[in-house]
Image (cartoon, helix red, strand yellow):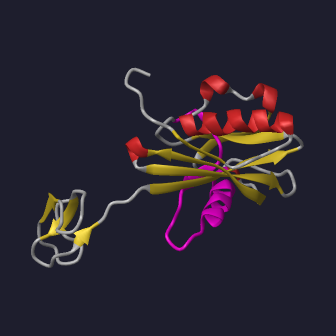
Amino acid sequence: MNYCSHCGNPVTHRIPEGDNRHRYVCDHCNSIHYENPRIVAGTVPVWNGQVLLCRRAIEPRHGYWTLPAGFMENTETTVEAAIRETREEALAEVEVDGLYTMLHVPHIDQVHMFFRARLKDGTFGVGEESLDAQLFPLADIPWQELAFPTIRETLERFVRDTETGEFPLHIGDIRYRMGK
């Protein structure tokens, strides 16, 4: 950030009085510009024991498989964002069963939230941000072609929990490791 969005004057990056973190501060109008993590919301959509995945048509990770998910918009709840992203990426309508994974990704300032969901009628398609959408039996998930660690973590837990029939809320961290 170079300029204040309130008055247009240059900002400095410093710790404001009474705070303990660096922030962008306007020395002209005294506005403090907070930068907070972004929320990614999505679903684990299921139909007849199969999970719906989308092949990404956008970067990052173009061509890799993902659960339908994306950034939450202002004025949305996390559930609304997850439903909207599923509709946009997979042209699918879902009923949400509840929050399933909440994964913190601090090195990129994100929190990923996935909700278990059921396709309402089994129909789906390919949205603008997808190259393909397919239902996969759990034994056939394309593990080597998954787009992100949060997708892998969520699907690994889902496969294990499907075996037990219990789906608790999983909260965890995905930390970047050099060389991996």
Vertically, is 5 above or below 67?
below
Residue farthest toward the top in the current orientation of the protein: 179
Residue, x 73% and y 29% (percent of image)? 141
> Where in the figure is residue 88, as x and y percent of width and height?
64, 56
Quarter where residue 180 is shown: top left
> Foreground residue, 48 or 20?
20
Residues in magenta, as a range: 62-89
- Whether the magenta-drawn stretch holds residue 72 is answered as yes
* Front-lying residue, 64 or 1: 1
Residue 148 visible in the picture: no
Q: Where residue 10 sits: x, y (%)?
A: 11, 66
Say how many tags the image has: 0
Which residue appears at 67% of the width and 54% of the height?
Answer: 86
Magenta stretch contains residue 55: no
- Residues 41 and 87: in front is 41
Name the quarter where the N terminus is drawn: bottom left
